[in-house]
Amino acid sequence: MPPVEPSPNLWVGELSHLGLQITEFRSRARHHSLFVTERCSSNCLMCSQPPKDKDDVESLIKRNQELIDLMRPAPEYLTITGGEPTLLGDRLFLLIDQLKTSLPDTELHMLTNGRTFAWPEYTQQFAAVGHPNLCLGVPLYSDCAGDHDHIVQAKGAFHQTVAGLHQAARNGIRVEIRVVLHRLTIPRLTKLVEYIYRNLSFVEHVALMGLEYVGYTPRNIGELWIDPYDYQAELERAVKLLAMRGMTVSIYNHQLCVLAPTLWPYAQKSISDWKNLYLPECEKCSALDECGGLFTVSRQVDGLRLSLRQEADVR
């Protein structure tokens, strides 16, 4: 009898007070994440994972610690996400230390609103863990404090985030800035990238990201929606301002067919494979292999896009 080939998928199940949780680790996939909490200190208008105020830290820490030890072969990239990971407190340091020991060569990306890093003592403790391949992904939505605070629905968030970015840099923590593009961020996008260049030039990457129609976005779509076709001039100006000054900039979550050809070199295939979609029309495109495609939820947006454009034309 021939030997049984090991499955490329690893399933981990746990029964807790939160219910049965099933986690999949696919060794051949490129995108992997550790979901560490549903709690968050912000409440963004377009949050793809709406926060819940429940104590889930202990349960999720236990699950993630077990999962880390089972990740073989080691993934090339791993994202820590939530919720807001820093709400784990000292438990986050233990988790990152375990990742440093068990998966030392894995590139670790932590998505955080950056606000907790405004406290120097916390940032020093975080840096002291000494993970060699860790980068923070921090959202910044405007150069204007009031606009940023409105988008994240948290007063004072802008100043905390900017202070957190500086504290991270001061302690040698790598940082990426993320900007989700929608009707509230596009008008000041050029001013925002100018602000980033003049005040946050230490960041190693700026990601300009398309809107995902999930989570809070559907209920706030009237306030957020702008067709990507209609902000190409602002996007191109922002990308060029950063690129010509030597800053690394990328465009995420956009199809090549909605981007000006001059922006194609900056477009990345950024959508996780498990929520990535190509339409039947895409099969005929000569640029299919280079295009990042759409989110699977984009099927719901086509009719919405048409109705919103018709409403705009009426107005």
Image (tube, helix red, strand yellow):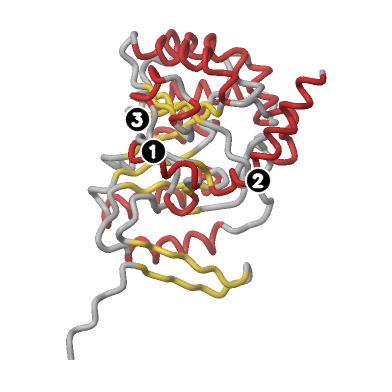
Q: Of tags 2 and 1, which is closer to the observer?
A: 2
Q: Of tags 2 and 3, which is closer to the observer?
A: 2
The amino acid sitting under disc 2 is: Gln
Residue at the far bottom in the pictured view: 1
The alpha-carbon separation of the residues under discs 3 and 1 comes to 22 Å
Residue 42 image label: none
How many C-alpha atoms fall within 10 Å of the one at disc 3: few (<14), some, or many (≥20)? many
Question: Which picture quadrant has residue 121?
Answer: top left
The amino acid sitting under disc 1 is: Lys
How many C-alpha atoms fall within 10 Å of the one at disc 2: few (<14), some, or many (≥20)? few
Q: Residue at x 38, y 17 (%)?
A: 262
Q: Earlier in the sequence, mark 3 or mark 1?
A: 3
The amino acid sitting under disc 3 is: Arg
Q: Which residue is mark 3?
A: 174
Residue at the far left in the pictured view: 2
Quarter that holds the C terminus: top right
Q: Which residue is mark 2?
A: 300
Q: Residue at x 53, y 13 (%)?
A: 234
Locate residue 68 relative to residue 211 in the image: left or right.
Answer: left
> As displayed, is residue 231 above or below residue 100?
above
Q: Residue at x 48, y 59 (%)?
A: 61
x and y percentages locating residue 145 in the rendered image:
63, 16
Q: Is residue 170 visible?
A: no
The alpha-carbon separation of the residues under discs 2 and 3 comes to 36 Å
The alpha-carbon separation of the residues under discs 2 and 1 comes to 21 Å
Q: Which residue is mark 1?
A: 269
Pointers 2 and 1 in contact (CB under 8 A)?
no
> As displayed, is residue 31 above or below residue 148?
below
Q: Residue at x 56, y 75 (%)?
A: 15
